[in-house]
Image (spheres, grey):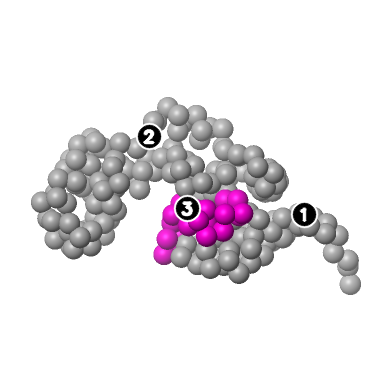
Amino acid sequence: MPQDHRPVKSVRVLLAEDQGMMRGALALLLGLEPDIEVVAQVGAGDEIVAAALTSRPDVALLDIELPGRSGLDAAADLREEVPDCRVLILTTFGRPGYLRRAMEAGAAGFLVKDGPVEELADAIRRVLRGETVIDPALAAAALSAGPSPLTARERDALIASVDGATVADIAVKLRLSESTVRNYLSSAIGKTGTRNRMEAVRAARQQGWL
């Protein structure tokens, strides 16, 4: 049998990606690196913390758009629950707002998925060394775009509107009065320069504010 030539101390990686084929391909390619070992794979955001507590990875490689809980929310959870684990966001959507939210959640890096696996492997090593790794084009876009104008409650109201929920439904979900919900939605519509809340949701998503 061929010998395993990994160093005694490999970088332990948790991989969170909802598309099974992409997750398997990434795990396979990263596993070919002599100093990287994928110790856990999950397909949903609400599985990340439990998997990290069990496998104790050095680096968590997280997609953003995951079922159950977003990778950005999971990054904040990991900062609290597994503080020794560095987080690297890897996503298809290079949106400026996502980068700002990732940094606020404590992520150490943010890359888009169209780069070569060698670049990803190098980023994993760099964040483990304490560096911050950010896609240069996305960093420039984030600086020019500025921070999200939405308050936390305006963002909550828009997120609750995604599935076409009524104002009454949103009010129950957020435990607010219907008039307060209308005020938040109206303010969000104004800040996004749109005509209604569904347009506001689309505009905010395109900027990475949701």
Closer to the chain start, of discs 1 and 3, is 1
**Amino acid type, residue under disc 1 in the picture:** Asp
The vertical placement of 122 against 45, above or below, is above
Whether tag 2 and tag 1 are in contact, CB under 8 A, the answer is no
**Mark 2 — residue?**
147
Mark identifier at residue 76: 3
Task: Name the residue at 37% across, 34% down.
Answer: 147
Instruction: Examine the image and state in which quarter residue 172 appears.
Output: bottom left
Number of marks drawn: 3
Q: Measuring from the top left, give residue 94's x and y in whole percent.
A: 48, 42
Q: Measuring from the top left, give residue 83's x and y in whole percent.
A: 57, 54
> What's drawn in magenta, residue-wise?
62-87
Q: Is residue 163 left or right of residue 105?
A: left
Closer to the eye: label 1 or 3: 3
Task: Name the residue at 66% across, 56% down.
Answer: 58
Quadrant (top left, top right, bottom left, bottom right) of the N terminus:
bottom right
Task: Name the residue at 42% across, 27% down.
Answer: 144
Res 43 seen here: no
* Mark 3 residue element: helix
Of all residues, the one furthest to the top in this rendering is 144
**Mark 1 — residue?**
35
Q: Measuring from the top left, give residue 68's x and y in whole percent.
A: 41, 64
Find the distance from the CA under tag 2 to the CA under tag 1.
37 Å
Find the distance from the CA under tag 2 to the CA under tag 3.
18 Å
Report crowding for label 2: few under 14, some 14 to 19, many 20 or more residues within 10 A (C-alpha). some
The vertical placement of 76 against 131, above or below, is below
* Mark 1 residue element: loop
Report crowding for label 1: few under 14, some 14 to 19, many 20 or more residues within 10 A (C-alpha). some
Instruction: Examine the image and state in which quarter residue 162 appears.
Output: bottom left
Q: Is residue 38 left or right of residue 48?
A: right
